[in-house]
Image: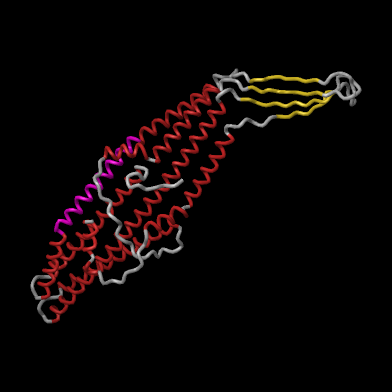
Amino acid sequence: MKIQAYLLSIFILTAGAAKAETVDIDALTETALSKNIKLESMKYGVSASENAEVYSGSLTDPMVSLGLVNEGTNYTVGQAGMSRYTVMVSQMFPFFGKLGAKQTEAKYKTQALRESVRAEKLEVINSVRSLYLDLYNIQESKKLLNTKMRLIQMTESSAQAKYSSGMMDSKDVLMVQREKYMVMEALEMMNEKERMLKTSLAHITGKDSDDFGEFALLPDREGELDVQALYKMAVESSVTLKSMENEVNAMAANVKMKELEKYPDFTVTLGYEPRPGYTMSDVYSASIGFNIPLYYSSRQLPAINEAKAQKLKADTVYSNMRHELRSMLTELVANADSSKRIMDIYQSGISAKADQTRDAALAAYKQGRGNASDVIAAVNTSVEYKMKYLEKYSEREKSLSRLNVLTGGKLYGTIIED
Protein backbone atom coordinates (compact mmCIF):
# COMPACT_ATOMS: atom_id res chain seq x y z
CA MET A 1 0.00 0.00 0.00
CA LYS A 2 3.00 2.34 0.39
CA ILE A 3 3.37 2.69 -3.37
CA GLN A 4 -0.27 3.66 -3.82
CA ALA A 5 -0.20 6.13 -0.96
CA TYR A 6 2.91 7.80 -2.34
CA LEU A 7 1.58 7.97 -5.89
CA LEU A 8 -1.66 9.48 -4.68
CA SER A 9 0.26 12.13 -2.72
CA ILE A 10 2.21 13.09 -5.84
CA PHE A 11 -0.81 14.67 -7.48
CA ILE A 12 -2.33 16.58 -4.61
CA LEU A 13 -1.91 19.83 -6.54
CA THR A 14 -4.17 18.50 -9.31
CA ALA A 15 -6.85 16.97 -7.09
CA GLY A 16 -9.40 19.54 -8.18
CA ALA A 17 -9.32 18.46 -11.83
CA ALA A 18 -12.46 16.96 -13.39
CA LYS A 19 -12.43 13.18 -13.10
CA ALA A 20 -13.27 11.14 -16.18
CA GLU A 21 -14.61 7.61 -16.19
CA THR A 22 -11.98 5.13 -14.99
CA VAL A 23 -10.73 2.54 -17.47
CA ASP A 24 -11.23 -1.04 -16.23
CA ILE A 25 -8.13 -3.06 -17.13
CA ASP A 26 -9.95 -6.38 -16.59
CA ALA A 27 -12.65 -5.40 -19.09
CA LEU A 28 -9.97 -4.25 -21.56
CA THR A 29 -8.13 -7.55 -21.20
CA GLU A 30 -11.29 -9.59 -21.69
CA THR A 31 -12.15 -7.60 -24.82
CA ALA A 32 -8.63 -8.03 -26.19
CA LEU A 33 -8.76 -11.80 -25.69
CA SER A 34 -12.15 -12.11 -27.36
CA LYS A 35 -11.38 -9.88 -30.38
CA ASN A 36 -7.74 -10.66 -31.10
CA ILE A 37 -7.49 -11.73 -34.76
CA LYS A 38 -4.24 -13.64 -34.30
CA LEU A 39 -5.78 -15.69 -31.48
CA GLU A 40 -8.80 -16.44 -33.63
CA SER A 41 -6.54 -17.63 -36.44
CA MET A 42 -4.54 -19.83 -34.06
CA LYS A 43 -7.75 -21.44 -32.75
CA TYR A 44 -8.64 -22.51 -36.29
CA GLY A 45 -5.14 -23.97 -36.56
CA VAL A 46 -5.78 -26.05 -33.43
CA SER A 47 -9.12 -27.22 -34.86
CA ALA A 48 -7.43 -28.27 -38.12
CA SER A 49 -4.74 -30.15 -36.20
CA GLU A 50 -7.36 -31.95 -34.09
CA ASN A 51 -9.01 -33.23 -37.26
CA ALA A 52 -5.64 -34.25 -38.67
CA GLU A 53 -5.06 -36.20 -35.45
CA VAL A 54 -8.24 -38.21 -36.12
CA TYR A 55 -7.54 -39.21 -39.73
CA SER A 56 -3.81 -39.82 -39.21
CA GLY A 57 -4.63 -43.09 -37.41
CA SER A 58 -7.03 -44.36 -40.06
CA LEU A 59 -6.37 -46.91 -42.75
CA THR A 60 -6.31 -45.86 -46.38
CA ASP A 61 -9.48 -46.40 -48.39
CA PRO A 62 -9.94 -49.91 -49.82
CA MET A 63 -9.70 -50.35 -53.58
CA VAL A 64 -12.43 -52.08 -55.58
CA SER A 65 -11.67 -53.38 -59.08
CA LEU A 66 -14.31 -54.47 -61.58
CA GLY A 67 -13.19 -56.40 -64.63
CA LEU A 68 -13.92 -58.82 -67.42
CA VAL A 69 -11.99 -61.93 -68.53
CA ASN A 70 -13.04 -62.80 -72.06
CA GLU A 71 -12.05 -65.55 -74.56
CA GLY A 72 -11.52 -64.13 -78.03
CA THR A 73 -12.39 -60.68 -79.29
CA ASN A 74 -16.16 -61.15 -79.17
CA TYR A 75 -18.19 -61.05 -75.99
CA THR A 76 -18.22 -64.68 -74.74
CA VAL A 77 -19.37 -64.49 -71.07
CA GLY A 78 -21.90 -67.32 -70.67
CA GLN A 79 -20.64 -68.96 -73.86
CA ALA A 80 -16.95 -69.77 -73.27
CA GLY A 81 -15.93 -71.60 -70.14
CA MET A 82 -13.10 -69.25 -69.14
CA SER A 83 -14.99 -66.00 -69.79
CA ARG A 84 -16.20 -64.34 -66.57
CA TYR A 85 -16.64 -61.14 -64.63
CA THR A 86 -14.17 -60.22 -61.87
CA VAL A 87 -14.65 -58.29 -58.63
CA MET A 88 -11.50 -57.55 -56.56
CA VAL A 89 -11.27 -55.77 -53.19
CA SER A 90 -7.85 -54.65 -51.90
CA GLN A 91 -6.90 -53.16 -48.53
CA MET A 92 -3.45 -51.89 -47.55
CA PHE A 93 -2.30 -52.51 -43.94
CA PRO A 94 0.73 -50.56 -42.75
CA PHE A 95 3.41 -52.39 -40.83
CA PHE A 96 2.61 -52.73 -37.13
CA GLY A 97 3.21 -49.45 -35.27
CA LYS A 98 3.18 -47.04 -38.22
CA LEU A 99 -0.35 -45.76 -37.70
CA GLY A 100 0.26 -45.40 -33.98
CA ALA A 101 3.41 -43.37 -34.58
CA LYS A 102 1.59 -41.09 -37.03
CA GLN A 103 -1.27 -40.52 -34.59
CA THR A 104 1.16 -39.86 -31.74
CA GLU A 105 3.00 -37.28 -33.83
CA ALA A 106 -0.29 -35.56 -34.72
CA LYS A 107 -1.39 -35.60 -31.06
CA TYR A 108 1.79 -33.84 -29.90
CA LYS A 109 1.53 -31.29 -32.72
CA THR A 110 -2.02 -30.48 -31.62
CA GLN A 111 -0.93 -30.09 -28.01
CA ALA A 112 1.94 -27.83 -29.08
CA LEU A 113 -0.53 -25.61 -30.92
CA ARG A 114 -2.81 -25.49 -27.86
CA GLU A 115 0.11 -24.35 -25.72
CA SER A 116 0.98 -21.75 -28.38
CA VAL A 117 -2.54 -20.36 -28.07
CA ARG A 118 -2.14 -20.17 -24.28
CA ALA A 119 1.21 -18.43 -24.74
CA GLU A 120 -0.36 -15.90 -27.11
CA LYS A 121 -3.14 -15.20 -24.60
CA LEU A 122 -0.55 -14.45 -21.93
CA GLU A 123 1.24 -12.13 -24.37
CA VAL A 124 -2.01 -10.30 -25.08
CA ILE A 125 -2.67 -9.87 -21.35
CA ASN A 126 0.90 -8.62 -20.88
CA SER A 127 0.59 -6.20 -23.81
CA VAL A 128 -2.65 -4.72 -22.46
CA ARG A 129 -1.12 -4.25 -19.02
CA SER A 130 2.08 -2.76 -20.44
CA LEU A 131 0.16 -0.24 -22.57
CA TYR A 132 -2.10 0.57 -19.61
CA LEU A 133 0.94 1.29 -17.42
CA ASP A 134 2.54 3.47 -20.10
CA LEU A 135 -0.67 5.45 -20.56
CA TYR A 136 -1.08 5.86 -16.80
CA ASN A 137 2.52 7.10 -16.63
CA ILE A 138 1.93 9.64 -19.40
CA GLN A 139 -1.42 10.73 -17.96
CA GLU A 140 0.08 11.50 -14.55
CA SER A 141 3.24 12.99 -16.04
CA LYS A 142 1.07 15.41 -18.02
CA LYS A 143 -0.63 16.40 -14.78
CA LEU A 144 2.79 17.10 -13.27
CA LEU A 145 3.83 19.15 -16.31
CA ASN A 146 0.58 21.14 -16.12
CA THR A 147 1.30 21.81 -12.44
CA LYS A 148 4.83 22.82 -13.41
CA MET A 149 3.37 25.12 -16.06
CA ARG A 150 1.20 26.87 -13.44
CA LEU A 151 4.19 27.33 -11.15
CA ILE A 152 6.29 28.69 -14.01
CA GLN A 153 3.48 31.06 -14.98
CA MET A 154 3.29 32.29 -11.38
CA THR A 155 7.05 32.89 -11.47
CA GLU A 156 6.68 34.66 -14.82
CA SER A 157 4.07 37.01 -13.36
CA SER A 158 6.38 37.85 -10.46
CA ALA A 159 9.32 38.38 -12.84
CA GLN A 160 7.29 40.67 -15.11
CA ALA A 161 6.08 42.66 -12.11
CA LYS A 162 9.65 43.15 -10.91
CA TYR A 163 10.78 44.11 -14.41
CA SER A 164 7.91 46.60 -14.79
CA SER A 165 8.78 48.22 -11.46
CA GLY A 166 12.45 48.50 -12.42
CA MET A 167 13.64 46.10 -9.74
CA MET A 168 15.49 43.90 -12.30
CA ASP A 169 16.32 43.61 -15.95
CA SER A 170 14.55 41.36 -18.46
CA LYS A 171 16.92 38.40 -17.96
CA ASP A 172 14.64 36.62 -15.48
CA VAL A 173 11.57 37.19 -17.64
CA LEU A 174 13.27 35.68 -20.67
CA MET A 175 14.61 32.74 -18.64
CA VAL A 176 11.18 31.91 -17.25
CA GLN A 177 9.53 32.24 -20.67
CA ARG A 178 12.11 29.93 -22.20
CA GLU A 179 11.35 27.36 -19.50
CA LYS A 180 7.62 27.76 -20.18
CA TYR A 181 8.13 27.00 -23.87
CA MET A 182 10.18 23.93 -22.94
CA VAL A 183 7.27 22.68 -20.82
CA MET A 184 4.89 23.31 -23.72
CA GLU A 185 7.19 21.30 -26.00
CA ALA A 186 7.36 18.43 -23.48
CA LEU A 187 3.57 18.41 -23.19
CA GLU A 188 3.18 18.27 -26.97
CA MET A 189 5.61 15.35 -27.20
CA MET A 190 3.70 13.53 -24.47
CA ASN A 191 0.41 14.18 -26.24
CA GLU A 192 1.84 12.63 -29.41
CA LYS A 193 3.16 9.60 -27.52
CA GLU A 194 -0.19 9.25 -25.76
CA ARG A 195 -2.03 9.23 -29.11
CA MET A 196 0.26 6.49 -30.41
CA LEU A 197 -0.16 4.35 -27.29
CA LYS A 198 -3.94 4.77 -27.31
CA THR A 199 -4.00 3.74 -30.97
CA SER A 200 -2.01 0.60 -30.08
CA LEU A 201 -4.37 -0.16 -27.20
CA ALA A 202 -7.40 0.36 -29.44
CA HIS A 203 -5.89 -2.01 -32.00
CA ILE A 204 -5.14 -4.79 -29.52
CA THR A 205 -8.58 -4.50 -27.92
CA GLY A 206 -10.44 -4.26 -31.22
CA LYS A 207 -11.94 -0.84 -30.49
CA ASP A 208 -12.85 1.63 -33.22
CA SER A 209 -12.16 4.60 -30.94
CA ASP A 210 -9.08 5.52 -28.90
CA ASP A 211 -11.14 7.40 -26.32
CA PHE A 212 -10.64 5.39 -23.14
CA GLY A 213 -11.08 7.76 -20.20
CA GLU A 214 -8.98 7.99 -17.04
CA PHE A 215 -6.33 5.35 -16.36
CA ALA A 216 -6.20 4.21 -12.75
CA LEU A 217 -3.38 3.18 -10.44
CA LEU A 218 -3.06 -0.61 -10.59
CA PRO A 219 -2.93 -2.66 -7.37
CA ASP A 220 0.48 -3.43 -5.91
CA ARG A 221 2.21 -6.69 -6.71
CA GLU A 222 4.31 -7.04 -3.60
CA GLY A 223 6.40 -10.04 -2.53
CA GLU A 224 9.97 -11.27 -2.56
CA LEU A 225 11.33 -12.49 -5.88
CA ASP A 226 13.66 -15.48 -5.77
CA VAL A 227 15.24 -16.39 -9.12
CA GLN A 228 15.66 -20.07 -8.25
CA ALA A 229 12.03 -20.44 -7.16
CA LEU A 230 10.85 -18.55 -10.25
CA TYR A 231 12.98 -20.75 -12.50
CA LYS A 232 11.50 -23.89 -10.97
CA MET A 233 8.02 -22.42 -11.45
CA ALA A 234 8.80 -21.48 -15.06
CA VAL A 235 10.16 -24.94 -15.93
CA GLU A 236 6.97 -26.50 -14.57
CA SER A 237 4.46 -24.01 -15.99
CA SER A 238 5.95 -22.07 -18.93
CA VAL A 239 3.58 -22.51 -21.86
CA THR A 240 6.43 -21.75 -24.27
CA LEU A 241 8.48 -24.61 -22.85
CA LYS A 242 5.45 -26.89 -22.91
CA SER A 243 4.83 -26.07 -26.56
CA MET A 244 8.47 -26.76 -27.43
CA GLU A 245 8.42 -29.99 -25.42
CA ASN A 246 5.41 -31.20 -27.38
CA GLU A 247 7.17 -30.34 -30.63
CA VAL A 248 10.18 -32.39 -29.49
CA ASN A 249 7.88 -35.32 -28.67
CA ALA A 250 6.22 -34.99 -32.09
CA MET A 251 9.63 -35.22 -33.76
CA ALA A 252 10.51 -38.27 -31.66
CA ALA A 253 7.32 -39.93 -32.94
CA ASN A 254 8.30 -38.92 -36.47
CA VAL A 255 11.70 -40.60 -36.03
CA LYS A 256 9.96 -43.78 -34.92
CA MET A 257 7.64 -43.63 -37.93
CA LYS A 258 10.56 -43.11 -40.34
CA GLU A 259 12.40 -46.07 -38.82
CA LEU A 260 9.33 -48.24 -39.40
CA GLU A 261 9.31 -47.23 -43.07
CA LYS A 262 12.07 -49.78 -43.70
CA TYR A 263 9.52 -52.51 -43.02
CA PRO A 264 7.02 -53.42 -45.76
CA ASP A 265 3.33 -52.60 -45.85
CA PHE A 266 0.93 -55.36 -46.80
CA THR A 267 -1.92 -55.25 -49.29
CA VAL A 268 -4.56 -57.99 -48.93
CA THR A 269 -6.67 -58.66 -52.03
CA LEU A 270 -9.85 -60.73 -52.17
CA GLY A 271 -11.47 -61.64 -55.47
CA TYR A 272 -14.72 -63.12 -56.75
CA GLU A 273 -15.33 -64.27 -60.35
CA PRO A 274 -18.87 -65.46 -61.17
CA ARG A 275 -19.46 -67.71 -64.21
CA PRO A 276 -23.04 -67.16 -65.34
CA GLY A 277 -24.65 -69.74 -67.63
CA TYR A 278 -22.25 -72.58 -66.83
CA THR A 279 -22.16 -75.43 -64.41
CA MET A 280 -18.58 -74.56 -63.58
CA SER A 281 -18.12 -73.17 -60.07
CA ASP A 282 -17.51 -69.51 -59.39
CA VAL A 283 -13.88 -68.59 -58.70
CA TYR A 284 -12.66 -67.14 -55.40
CA SER A 285 -9.15 -65.77 -54.87
CA ALA A 286 -7.01 -64.26 -52.13
CA SER A 287 -3.54 -62.76 -52.31
CA ILE A 288 -1.16 -60.64 -50.29
CA GLY A 289 1.35 -58.17 -51.68
CA PHE A 290 4.10 -56.17 -50.01
CA ASN A 291 6.76 -53.70 -51.01
CA ILE A 292 10.45 -54.57 -50.84
CA PRO A 293 12.73 -51.82 -49.43
CA LEU A 294 15.22 -52.43 -52.21
CA TYR A 295 16.45 -48.82 -52.21
CA TYR A 296 16.82 -48.53 -48.44
CA SER A 297 20.21 -46.82 -48.54
CA SER A 298 19.02 -44.06 -50.88
CA ARG A 299 15.41 -43.70 -49.68
CA GLN A 300 14.51 -44.87 -46.16
CA LEU A 301 17.91 -44.34 -44.50
CA PRO A 302 18.30 -40.65 -45.53
CA ALA A 303 14.72 -40.00 -44.35
CA ILE A 304 15.55 -41.57 -40.97
CA ASN A 305 18.71 -39.48 -40.65
CA GLU A 306 16.79 -36.33 -41.60
CA ALA A 307 14.17 -37.00 -38.90
CA LYS A 308 16.88 -37.69 -36.30
CA ALA A 309 18.71 -34.46 -37.19
CA GLN A 310 15.50 -32.45 -36.83
CA LYS A 311 14.87 -34.10 -33.48
CA LEU A 312 18.39 -33.25 -32.27
CA LYS A 313 17.93 -29.66 -33.45
CA ALA A 314 14.66 -29.41 -31.51
CA ASP A 315 16.37 -30.85 -28.41
CA THR A 316 19.08 -28.20 -28.69
CA VAL A 317 16.57 -25.36 -29.12
CA TYR A 318 14.57 -26.62 -26.13
CA SER A 319 17.68 -26.88 -23.95
CA ASN A 320 18.82 -23.42 -25.04
CA MET A 321 15.40 -21.99 -24.21
CA ARG A 322 15.65 -23.32 -20.66
CA HIS A 323 19.00 -21.55 -20.26
CA GLU A 324 17.61 -18.36 -21.78
CA LEU A 325 14.66 -18.59 -19.43
CA ARG A 326 16.95 -18.43 -16.40
CA SER A 327 18.78 -15.46 -17.91
CA MET A 328 15.54 -13.59 -18.64
CA LEU A 329 14.20 -14.29 -15.15
CA THR A 330 17.42 -13.01 -13.57
CA GLU A 331 17.33 -9.82 -15.65
CA LEU A 332 13.67 -9.12 -14.90
CA VAL A 333 14.09 -9.75 -11.17
CA ALA A 334 17.14 -7.45 -11.11
CA ASN A 335 15.18 -4.75 -12.94
CA ALA A 336 12.19 -5.09 -10.61
CA ASP A 337 14.38 -4.99 -7.49
CA SER A 338 16.40 -2.04 -8.79
CA SER A 339 13.23 -0.08 -9.61
CA LYS A 340 11.84 -0.85 -6.15
CA ARG A 341 15.02 0.41 -4.44
CA ILE A 342 14.94 3.65 -6.42
CA MET A 343 11.25 4.08 -5.56
CA ASP A 344 12.09 3.56 -1.88
CA ILE A 345 14.68 6.32 -2.14
CA TYR A 346 12.06 8.75 -3.40
CA GLN A 347 9.63 7.56 -0.74
CA SER A 348 12.20 8.04 2.00
CA GLY A 349 11.80 11.83 1.90
CA ILE A 350 13.98 13.10 -0.92
CA SER A 351 10.94 14.06 -2.98
CA ALA A 352 9.27 15.79 -0.02
CA LYS A 353 12.44 17.78 0.63
CA ALA A 354 12.51 18.81 -3.03
CA ASP A 355 8.92 20.07 -2.65
CA GLN A 356 9.91 22.08 0.42
CA THR A 357 12.85 23.58 -1.44
CA ARG A 358 10.54 24.44 -4.35
CA ASP A 359 7.98 26.14 -2.09
CA ALA A 360 10.68 28.06 -0.28
CA ALA A 361 12.20 29.27 -3.56
CA LEU A 362 8.80 30.37 -4.87
CA ALA A 363 7.98 32.24 -1.65
CA ALA A 364 11.38 33.93 -1.56
CA TYR A 365 11.13 35.02 -5.18
CA LYS A 366 7.70 36.57 -4.60
CA GLN A 367 9.21 38.56 -1.75
CA GLY A 368 11.97 39.85 -3.96
CA ARG A 369 14.73 37.53 -2.80
CA GLY A 370 16.62 35.06 -5.00
CA ASN A 371 16.48 34.81 -8.78
CA ALA A 372 14.43 32.97 -11.39
CA SER A 373 17.10 30.34 -12.04
CA ASP A 374 16.83 29.14 -8.44
CA VAL A 375 13.04 28.85 -8.73
CA ILE A 376 13.24 27.01 -12.07
CA ALA A 377 15.85 24.59 -10.74
CA ALA A 378 13.76 23.86 -7.64
CA VAL A 379 10.56 23.35 -9.65
CA ASN A 380 12.34 21.08 -12.16
CA THR A 381 13.87 18.97 -9.39
CA SER A 382 10.52 18.57 -7.65
CA VAL A 383 8.75 17.49 -10.84
CA GLU A 384 11.59 15.29 -12.08
CA TYR A 385 11.66 13.27 -8.85
CA LYS A 386 7.95 12.53 -9.17
CA MET A 387 8.22 11.67 -12.86
CA LYS A 388 11.19 9.40 -12.15
CA TYR A 389 9.13 7.65 -9.48
CA LEU A 390 6.32 7.12 -11.98
CA GLU A 391 8.79 5.78 -14.55
CA LYS A 392 10.29 3.29 -12.09
CA TYR A 393 6.84 2.24 -10.92
CA SER A 394 5.86 1.49 -14.52
CA GLU A 395 9.14 -0.36 -15.20
CA ARG A 396 8.75 -2.50 -12.10
CA GLU A 397 5.14 -3.43 -12.84
CA LYS A 398 6.02 -4.32 -16.44
CA SER A 399 8.89 -6.53 -15.25
CA LEU A 400 6.55 -8.32 -12.85
CA SER A 401 4.00 -8.76 -15.62
CA ARG A 402 6.66 -10.26 -17.86
CA LEU A 403 7.72 -12.62 -15.08
CA ASN A 404 4.11 -13.76 -14.91
CA VAL A 405 4.23 -14.57 -18.65
CA LEU A 406 7.45 -16.57 -18.30
CA THR A 407 5.95 -18.62 -15.45
CA GLY A 408 2.88 -19.45 -17.51
CA GLY A 409 0.68 -17.14 -15.40
CA LYS A 410 1.42 -19.12 -12.23
CA LEU A 411 3.26 -16.28 -10.45
CA TYR A 412 0.07 -14.21 -10.08
CA GLY A 413 -2.51 -16.92 -10.65
CA THR A 414 -3.55 -15.86 -14.15
CA ILE A 415 -6.10 -18.38 -15.40
CA ILE A 416 -5.93 -19.06 -19.14
CA GLU A 417 -8.93 -20.91 -20.52
CA ASP A 418 -8.58 -23.12 -23.60
Q: Is residue 201 above or below residue 178?
A: above
Residue 136 lies, in percent from the top left, at 31, 60
Report the magenta residues as a range.
322-350
Q: Is residue 155 above or below residue 405?
A: below
Left or right, 73 with reference to 151: right
Residue 285 lies, in percent from the top left, at 75, 20
Q: Is residue 398 above or below residue 289?
A: below
Residue at 36 percent of width and 32 percent of height: 319
Residue at 18 percent of width and 72 percent of height: 174
Q: Is residue 148 visible?
A: no
| Magenta-span inclusion, residue 348 | yes
Residue 173 lies, in percent from the top left, at 17, 74
Q: Is residue 169 above or below residue 195?
A: below
Residue 137 lies, in percent from the top left, at 29, 59
Left or right, 361 with reference to 275: left
Residue at 75 percent of width and 26 percent of height: 88
**Quadrant in the rendering for residue 320:** top left
Which quadrant is home to the N terminus? bottom left
